[in-house]
Amino acid sequence: MGLPSRPSGAPSGIETVLYEFVDAYDRAYDAAAAAVDLSVAQACVLGSLNSSRGMGSLAEEFGCDASNITQIARRLEGLGLAVRELDPADRRARKIARTAAGDAVVQRFEEAFAYARAAAARLTDVEQAQLAALLRKAMGGQLPQ
Amino acid sequence: MGLPSRPSGAPSGIETVLYEFVDAYDRAYDAAAAAVDLSVAQACVLGSLNSSRGMGSLAEEFGCDASNITQIARRLEGLGLAVRELDPADRRARKIARTAAGDAVVQRFEEAFAYARAAAARLTDVEQAQLAALLRKAMGGQLPQ
DNA sequence: TATTGTTATACTCTATAACTATA
DNA sequence: TATAGTTATAGAGTATAACAATA
């Protein structure tokens, strides 16, 4: 289990609710990763391999050092969940892709990570749209990609 | 920097927005901890020391093993941000509390962690109340403590 | 010379198991 | 015997620095 993101003080009102939601989301994510015997970092990277990609793009996506991705990729490869292959177009580069076993683990993870799905299910369609609009505005208006 | 909680696939609609918000919140938390030269775990624990507490209650709060708290507490103590003292009432127990230096670091952290504050500031009072109500309902109705 | 990725290293987080001291 | 906390240990995440191979 990982320590959740947690505000130090006890912010009142809306800030407390935002924190509670993030905390619950993160805990559910941790638990889902544990349910498929992966660390959070491994689950994050494995989940991002929807198509074969370079190591550098993963480091950029996660905002971490490339050497970090190297280590996580090696462990995923050791588990048989991903493979690294040379890129014939640029022989400095390597591409990493999920194996069939990796696909299966991701599917199990998705089933285990019920949090966002369950949260949405407690709201009506209209409420979901309201919540999405409010969160987008709170985030500064930028749309998710 | 830590890897954010990230859904593996690309859930559509409300689930994507929920993820984007959690991701942005977590990244901002990581950055604020780094800004005061603490790890996320250290910032979490230090922030929870609003009053002197036993080690066991911290482990329970964070859902982690007690030995984990021992290590983090030792590092916080080494940094001069917290102190552990024997509990005269039960001499097996120790209480940990922030020092004045720890208080100052927490204050700097709060200033650096502007995410929830900024998010709230983008909404009107009515919108904040709507967002809080929707998130509470999405979480299953349990109120934050 | 610049870029992609790896290796070597060190520190932190985390859990398990074994331990000390106290209740 | 049970409880609070620590120590020992091992595996994983993470960054920095140095490196190899290729562009």
Image: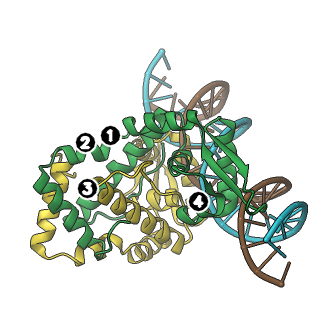
Chain colours: A green, B yellow, C brown, D cyan
Mark 3 vs mark 1, foreground winner is 3
Where residue B123 sits, quadrant-wise, is bottom left
Q: Which amino acid, by three-letter code, is at mark 3?
A: Ile
Using residue A89 as the reference point, say whether residue B14 is left or right of it. left
Tell me which chain the residue with mark 3 is part of: B
The percent position of residue B124, horizontal first and vertical second, equals 14, 76
Near-viewer residue (B36 or A2): A2
Residue receiving disc 4: A58
Tell me which chain the residue with mark 2 is part of: A
Cα separation between marks 3 and 1? 14 Å
The percent position of residue B100, horizontal first and vertical second, equals 46, 72
Using residue B129 as the reference point, say whether residue C7 is left or right of it. right
Above or below for B3 versus C16: below
Q: Which amino acid, by three-letter code, is at mark 4?
A: Leu
- Residue A90 appears anywhere in the view: yes
Q: Earlier in the sequence, mark 4 or mark 1?
A: 4
Marks 2 and 4 belong to one chain: yes
The percent position of residue A21, horizontal first and vertical second, equals 28, 54
Numbered disc 3: secondary structure? helix
Residue receiving disc 2: A118
Above or below for A61 versus A96: below
Residue receiving disc 1: A114
- Residue B61 appears anywhere in the view: no
Cα separation between marks 4 and 3? 25 Å
**How many residues crowd around disc 4 within 10 Å: few (fewer than 14), some, or many (20 or more)?**
many
**Point 52% across, 45% down: residue:** A43
Where residue C10 sits, quadrant-wise, is bottom right
Residue receiving disc 3: B14
